[in-house]
């Protein structure tokens, strides 16, 4: 056993503290200079490195001071070897920490700068850990003289297994990074793919992008496919409606009532007692069945009076009624009956039609059905207009206005009440739908809304 004097202890301690004080002073000078230099440069990398190494550099000062103290200490070879290994271990840990801090700060910087998807940033951090941790373990095993062959084999096998398992995910991961770096597509954008999928971007993950479709469904699109496809980006969302517009359609059935008219007084009585569904059918069924024709065809009453009764004057007066002027079927009925009453008051010719040519009153029976289309703003609304059926368009423009007694079409009501788009609502309300084909009406609506969006 060696005999130690007080100098064997004091000298190493003096060297340690002297070196520690000197190194910390030099460290302060160095970081003050590097900080000033970093503020003058445009790049962020020097700031990242300075901040990431500031903490571990204190430990490096301690380690170097300990190395110098051990160099002058009179200790056995065994303890010298163990001390060296311990210091190398601490140094390896601190270097790994500094490397991770640098990588993490860089990831945070680019995540904010390019608005990278959170999933992509998390995947990169995981990859950094996967690289640093095995390297650190191998280094520590090498320092302490432990065998590393088995661990190397495990690492190689693990890397190969991971590469095999993620062979489909890796392209999407890099595509996600590309999306974040370019910023061409961001959360909240309304996009449309060449394959037809469209909607608002809810989230850009590390593997796929989540899109909310017009029917409120969630569409998952792999990032690799998103990068390779032609994508139309309509930009950030516009004003959201207080309540979404839900598109409906309806099935239309006709029912023979058994009521019929042989002359003009019979027609007047039938009109006065007919339900709204009967008035609606005889003034609108031709319009819907022959939606490709324009302008508005005559109503059934005018056609029967002209053809069956042979009274072209009265038939012309009935045909000249502009259905668009009336806010309800009751008002339309009153106009029809008033014209016939005026005519009967001045004409005594009450001829009957031949048997088989009577006017048969028919009523319309409708079953209203929901469609998958929902609009939360003007952009979703116009995209839904492009896709919905003519029956759906007919329901919201014609049937809701007269048969449901709303006085306005559903589109104008929603634009006014839920979006505050008074001017656009008025423009659509002023459109006379009876002077358009249904396809022509669809085109006019789309043009008005697109003009407002732009």
Image (tube, rainbow, N blue to C red):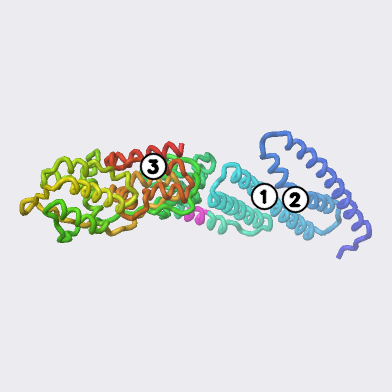
Q: Is residue 157 magenta?
A: yes
Q: Residue at x 35, y 40 (%)?
A: 431
Q: Measured along the vertical axis of the image, is residue 247 above or below residue 177?
A: below
Q: Residue at x 67, y 40 (%)?
A: 45
Residue 312 placement (x, y as % from top left): 15, 41
The range drawn in magenta is 156-162
* Residue at the left extreme of this rendering: 355
Q: Disc 3 on helix, strand or loop? A: helix
Task: Please indicate, yes or no, whether residue 300 appears anywhere in the rendered image.
Answer: no
Q: Which numbered disc flags the more N-terminal residue, 2 or 3? A: 2
Disc nearest the viewer among 2 and 3 = 3
Task: Please indicate, yes or no, whether residue 373 appears anywhere in the rendered image.
Answer: yes
Q: Residue at x 17, y 40 (%)?
A: 313
Determine which residue is flagged by label 2: 55
Mark 1, Cα crowd under 10 Å, few <14 / some 14-19 / many 20+, is: some
Tell me whether circle 2 and circle 1 mark residues in contact (CB < 8 Å).
Answer: yes
Q: Disc 1 on helix, strand or loop? A: helix
Q: Which numbered disc flags the more N-terminal residue, 2 or 1? A: 2
**How many numbered marks, from 0 up?**
3
Mark 2, Cα crowd under 10 Å, few <14 / some 14-19 / many 20+, is: some
Tell me whether circle 2 and circle 3 mark residues in contact (CB < 8 Å).
Answer: no
Numbered tag placed on residue 428 in the rendering = 3
Determine which residue is flagged by label 1: 101
In this view of the protein, which residue sits in the foreground, 188 or 340?
340
């Amino acid at each position: 056993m060696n005999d130690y004097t007080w100098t064997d202890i004091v000298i190493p301690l003096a060297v340690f503290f002297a070196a520690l004080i000197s190194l910390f002073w030099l460290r302060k000078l160095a970081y003050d200079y590097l900080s000033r230099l970093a503020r003058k440069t445009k790049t962020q990398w020097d700031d990242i490195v300075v901040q990431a190494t500031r903490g571990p550099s204190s430990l490096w000062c301690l380690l170097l001071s300990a190395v110098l103290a051990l160099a002058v200490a009179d200790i056995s070879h065994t303890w010298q070897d163990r001390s060296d290994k311990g210091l190398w271990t601490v140094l390896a840990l601190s270097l790994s920490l500094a490397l991770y801090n640098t990588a993490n700060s860089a990831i945070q910087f680019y995540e904010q700068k390019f608005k990278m998807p959170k999933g992509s940033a998390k995947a990169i951090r995981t990859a950094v850990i996967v690289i640093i941790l095995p390297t650190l373990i191998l280094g520590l095993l090498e320092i302490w003289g432990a065998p590393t062959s088995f661990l190397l084999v495990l690492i190689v096998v693990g890397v190969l297994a991971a590469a095999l398992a993620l062979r489909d995910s890796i392209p999407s991961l890099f595509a996600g990074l590309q999306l974040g770096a370019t910023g061409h597509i961001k959360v909240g954008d309304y996009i449309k793919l060449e394959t037809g999928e469209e909607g608002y971007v809810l989230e850009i993950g590390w593997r796929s992008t989540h899109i909310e479709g017009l029917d409120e469904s969630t569409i998952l699109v792999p990032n690799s496919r998103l990068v390779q496809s032609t994508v139309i980006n309509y930009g950030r969302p516009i004003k959201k409606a207080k309540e979404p517009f839900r598109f409906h359609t309806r099935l239309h059935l006709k029912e023979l009532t058994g009521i019929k008219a042989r002359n003009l007084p019979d027609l007047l009585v039938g009109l006065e007692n007919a339900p709204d569904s009967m008035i609606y059918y005889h003034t609108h069924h031709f319009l819907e069945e022959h939606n490709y024709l324009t302008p508005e065809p005559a109503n059934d009453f005018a056609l029967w009076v002209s053809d069956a009764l042979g009274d072209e004057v009265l038939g012309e007066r009935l045909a000249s009624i502009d259905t668009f002027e009336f806010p309800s079927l009751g008002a339309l009925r009153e106009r029809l009956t008033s014209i016939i009453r005026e005519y009967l008051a001045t004409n005594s010719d009450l001829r009957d039609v031949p048997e088989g040519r009577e006017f048969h009153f028919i009523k319309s029976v409708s079953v209203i059905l929901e469609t998958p289309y929902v609009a939360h703003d003007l952009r979703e609304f116009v995209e839904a207009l492009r896709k919905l059926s003519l029956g759906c368009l007919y329901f919201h423009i014609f049937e809701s206005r007269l048969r449901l007694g709303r006085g306005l079409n559903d589109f104008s009501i929603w634009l006014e009440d839920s979006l505050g788009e008074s001017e656009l609502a008025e423009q659509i309300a002023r459109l006379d739908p009876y002077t358009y084909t249904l396809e022509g009406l669809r085109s006019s609506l789309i043009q008005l809304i697109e003009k407002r969006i732009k």
